[in-house]
């Protein structure tokens, strides 16, 4: 099995999960790279993504599994694909997959909180305090409706910096799989528990994925 | 990306429609171009990006040095609300720049129900909707596409119309506008000069004069304005631009595949069909050129499906050669080939097998009328045995889903003709019982009817449309007589057909109706969730317009028509002859069997030959 590390940013962050699969399938065809197809009645090129990226979130650490066929050299694949990619999708590396994607345990992400009228003076301190509590329950949408979720046990690292007069940047490391918490739920916790500090806009970017031992996952 | 847009996009449905950034989009250095062109499609991204004409002109305009052509589509309602709330003006997808600052804003208008969207998009751009209120040289607002054959209903809003095919005339106007900008002309000077370009109609140079009975007396012309504007054509298709490097949307669109245009025009001459006349003369691409285009476009795009496009694909000379050439390339690559617009009379097993090799899709036939008498009237040269024969071949080949299209309200139609539709459907069922190779799957026939709409530049352009009540009576009659359980009957509602009939043969006074509808919230009228019949009726009442005067009144052949100022190359005398033949029930043979002298071949001035 082959694995591909890619970045999704800018305008491409609005490409949905389903559309992204189609986009990659077409990128391989445009690049003239043969890949394995699924079996069955209606075979299609096999591509599998590690963790579906929410619409609108950027990422530097997306992983996708596929199977190279023919004699294309792995090291040539990124350049070939990047010539065939829409704006905002960049293939960073292609290599042989050694571990299963299910071994991803932690996700590092940035939450950018924007305050149109300036960051409230005590915001940084109060948000730090918020995430140092022993429990912080948010609502999470599930297939069966809404469920409660305590984000604190799923939050490994938290730091915060003020990056501008109107912007706070939260760096978080979150449990990546079962149960998982999305960076958007961190912003949601701020809205819920500190309504006065609710940002006017929040944007998210995945930075890195790690295994259970804290090593970078590839 | 505009910061406001970044906030709005996560809140709307399918935001990838509003971002641009797709593979093969064309981005140029703003500081190095001297003319910004906004190519606007007055419908959604999914519809507009499926339009081949737009892709051709986008590519052709961007080949012009110094010109940057970008795409603009109509936002869906949720996006429009968000844009208005956040004061985001209508922007072009490639650069994200507001189009009100562009030099030219050109709309490709393919159907009347998009008219309100043109107004809405101008307003979203922050521009006055009326041409007279836009006094600066730029932006010039243009429109082309089928609206060009009767521009009058949109005359108050558009500065100039492109009549006919845009490949050449667009560039000539763009070059003139460049010159006007450099020389500091005012808008009037530019428009007067543009009117001198063949295929350009400048409505402000014409003034309609009406008689007391409401009919048109004449179109008064400003000095220098041509008496008639003749449509432009591309004479040699193999030499014309084809977009082989085409934008591949990052989200699903309606026709998400490579489209291969075989030929323009039609040899058939069905008397109700506007497309069959306004795109004459018949000009084809060679099979060799098409195979080459297809290979390049498929390889470049990564699409796994290709469709052949024309008004009647089975009339393409060299279809066998073309299909063989395409399949040689497509089959080993698992690329599927679809072949719409087949005619029942020359539908062959060989052809079907070739297409079937890759994928089996549903079959659609359009007999249009239920009896031979009426099919002769409309010159749909398909006999009942042709339809049944085609069905038999299809059933033997394993097809079990069939769609049959008809129109109700065709000139001279009687109840006997309506019942003939039910009769034909029953005969198709019988054919299936006799010949189906696999009856386990069960037969599914869908019969669809729409209400006939008389259109400009057809032999039926003088006809009255039947009333909505009469249409519904005929629908009920047919419904009560379509008894077979495997037949589903769908009918297109008569409300939109009436509005379309008013708009398509409207004059300049209809502009007030379009504006009233838009002011009352009308937009995206081609979508049933937005179309409101009551809003249109109210707008007509407010403008003092009687819909029956435009839609249902039979016009005399000597009446001055709003589109007489336009020539599509086909002579009015030909339409009159065809109308008389229709009433006599006499068919006209197809152009390949013998030229009937419509006049369109005179548009070929560079040595080309119609259907050559």
Image: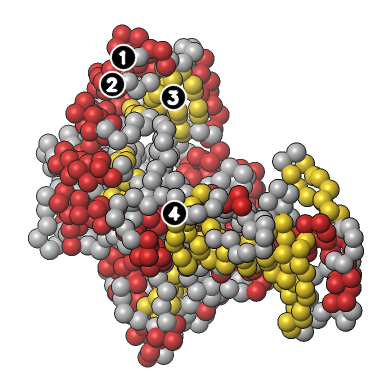
Q: Is residue B306 above or below residue B244?
A: above
- What residue is pinned by disc 1? B437
Q: Compute the Cα span from label 2 to label 4.
A: 42 Å
- Neighbours of disc 2 within 10 Å: few (<14), some (14-19), many (20+): some
Picture coordinates of residue A4 (x, y %)? Answer: 47, 59
Describe the element under mark 4 as helix, strand or loop: strand
- Neighbours of disc 4 within 10 Å: few (<14), some (14-19), many (20+): some
Q: Compute the Cα span from label 2 to label 3.
A: 21 Å
Q: Are marks 4 and 1 on the same chain?
A: no
In this rendering, position of residue A159 left or right of residue B148:
right
The residue under the point 54% across, 60% down is A218
In this rendering, position of residue B408 left or right of residue A56:
left
The residue under the point 21% across, 25% down is B349
Q: Compute the Cα span from label 4 to label 3.
A: 50 Å
The residue under the point 90% across, 64% down is A133
Q: Residue furthest front?
A: A213
Q: Are marks 4 and 3 on the same chain?
A: no
Q: Is residue B472 above or below residue B148?
A: above
- What residue is pinned by disc 4? A2
Q: Are marks 1 and 2 on the same chain?
A: yes
In this rendering, position of residue A194 left or right of residue B56:
right
Q: Compute the Cα span from label 4 to label 1.
A: 45 Å
- Residue B397 has which mark? 2
Describe the element under mark 2 as helix, strand or loop: loop
- Residue B447 has which mark? 3
Residues at marks 1 and 2 touching, judged by CB atoms closer than 8 Å:
yes
Residues at marks 4 and 1 touching, judged by CB atoms closer than 8 Å:
no
Picture coordinates of residue B319 (x, y %)? Answer: 18, 40
Q: Are marks 2 and 3 on the same chain?
A: yes
């Amino acid at each position: 099995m082959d694995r591909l590390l890619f970045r999704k940013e800018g305008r491409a962050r609005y490409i949905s999960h389903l559309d992204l699969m189609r986009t990659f399938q077409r990128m391989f065809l445009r690049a003239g790279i043969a890949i394995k197809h699924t079996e069955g009645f209606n075979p299609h090129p096999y591509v599998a993504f590690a963790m579906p990226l929410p619409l609108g979130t950027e990422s530097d650490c997306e992983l996708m599994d596929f199977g190279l066929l023919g004699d294309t050299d792995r090291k040539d694949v990124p350049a070939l694909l990047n010539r065939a990619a829409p704006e905002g999708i960049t293939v960073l590396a292609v290599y042989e997959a050694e571990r299963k994607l299910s071994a991803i345990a932690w996700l590092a992400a940035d939450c950018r909180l924007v305050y149109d009228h300036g960051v409230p003076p005590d915001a940084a301190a109060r948000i730090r305090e918020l995430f140092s509590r022993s429990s912080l329950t948010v609502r999470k949408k599930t297939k069966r409706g809404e469920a409660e979720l305590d984000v604190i046990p799923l939050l490994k690292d938290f730091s915060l910096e003020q990056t501008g007069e109107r912007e706070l940047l939260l760096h978080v490391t979150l449990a990546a799989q079962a149960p998982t918490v999305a960076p958007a739920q961190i912003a949601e916790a701020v809205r819920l528990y500190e309504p006065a500090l609710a940002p006017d806009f929040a944007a998210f970017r995945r930075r890195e994925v790690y295994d259970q031992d804290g090593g970078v996952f590839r | 990306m505009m910061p406001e847009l970044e906030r709005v996009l996560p809140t709307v449905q399918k935001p990838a429609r509003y971002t641009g950034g797709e593979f093969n989009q064309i981005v140029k250095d703003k500081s190095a171009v001297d003319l910004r062109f906004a190519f606007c499609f007055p419908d959604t991204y999914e519809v507009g990006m499926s339009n081949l004409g737009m892709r051709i002109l986008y590519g052709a305009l961007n080949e012009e040095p110094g010109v940057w052509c970008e795409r603009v589509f109509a936002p869906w309602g949720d996006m429009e609300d968000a844009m208005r709330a956040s004061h985001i003006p209508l922007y072009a997808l490639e650069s994200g720049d507001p189009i009100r600052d562009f030099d030219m804003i050109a709309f490709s208008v393919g159907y009347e129900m998009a008219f309100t969207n043109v107004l809405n998009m101008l307003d979203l751009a922050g521009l006055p909707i009326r041409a007279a209120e836009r006094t600066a040289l730029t932006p010039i607002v243009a429109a082309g596409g089928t609206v060009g054959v009767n521009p009058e209903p949109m005359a108050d809003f558009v500065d100039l119309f492109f009549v006919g095919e845009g490949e050449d005339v667009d560039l000539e106007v763009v070059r003139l506008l460049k010159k006007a900008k450099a020389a500091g002309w005012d808008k009037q000077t530019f428009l007067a000069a543009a009117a001198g370009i063949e295929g350009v109609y400048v409505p402000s140079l014409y003034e309609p004069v009406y008689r007391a009975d409401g009919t048109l007396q004449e179109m008064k012309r400003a000095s220098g304005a041509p008496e008639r504007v003749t449509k432009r054509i591309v004479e040699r298709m193999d030499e014309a631009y084809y977009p082989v490097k085409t934008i591949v949307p990052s989200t699903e669109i309606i026709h998400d595949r490579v489209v291969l245009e075989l030929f323009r025009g039609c040899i058939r001459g069905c008397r109700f069909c506007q497309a069959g006349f306004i795109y004459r003369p018949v000009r084809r691409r060679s099979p060799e050129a098409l195979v080459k285009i297809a290979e390049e476009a498929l390889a470049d795009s990564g699409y796994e499906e290709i469709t052949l496009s024309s008004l009647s694909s089975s009339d393409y000379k060299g279809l066998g050669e073309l299909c063989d050439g395409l399949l040689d390339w497509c089959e080993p690559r698992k690329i599927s080939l679809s072949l719409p617009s087949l005619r029942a009379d020359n539908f062959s097993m060989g052809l079907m097998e070739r297409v079937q090799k890759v994928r089996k899709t549903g079959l659609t036939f359009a007999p249009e009328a239920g009896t031979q008498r009426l099919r002769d009237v409309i010159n749909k040269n398909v006999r009942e045995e042709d339809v049944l024969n085609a069905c038999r071949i299809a059933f033997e080949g394993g097809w079990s889903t069939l769609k049959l299209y008809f129109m109700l309200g065709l000139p001279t139609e009687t109840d006997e003709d309506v019942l003939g539709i039910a009769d034909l459907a029953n005969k198709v069922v019988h054919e299936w019982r006799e010949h189906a190779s696999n009856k386990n799957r069960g037969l599914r026939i869908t019969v669809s009817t729409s209400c006939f709409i008389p259109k400009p530049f057809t032999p039926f352009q003088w006809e009255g449309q039947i009333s909505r009540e009469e249409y519904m009576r005929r629908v009920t009659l047919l419904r009560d007589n379509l008894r077979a359980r495997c037949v589903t009957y769908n009918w297109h509602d008569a409300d939109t057909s009436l509005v379309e009939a008013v708009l398509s043969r409207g004059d300049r006074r209809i502009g007030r109706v379009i504006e009233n509808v838009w002011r009352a919230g009308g937009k995206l009228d081609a979508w049933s969730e937005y179309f409101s019949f009551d809003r249109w009726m109210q707008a007509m009442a407010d403008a003092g317009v009687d819909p029956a005067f435009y839609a249902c009144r039979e016009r005399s052949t000597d009446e001055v028509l709003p589109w007489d100022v336009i020539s599509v190359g086909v002579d009015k005398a030909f339409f009159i002859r065809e109308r008389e033949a229709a009433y006599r029930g006499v068919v006209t043979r197809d152009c390949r069997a013998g030229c009937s002298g419509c006049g369109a071949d005179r548009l070929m001035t560079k040595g080309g030959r119609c259907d050559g």
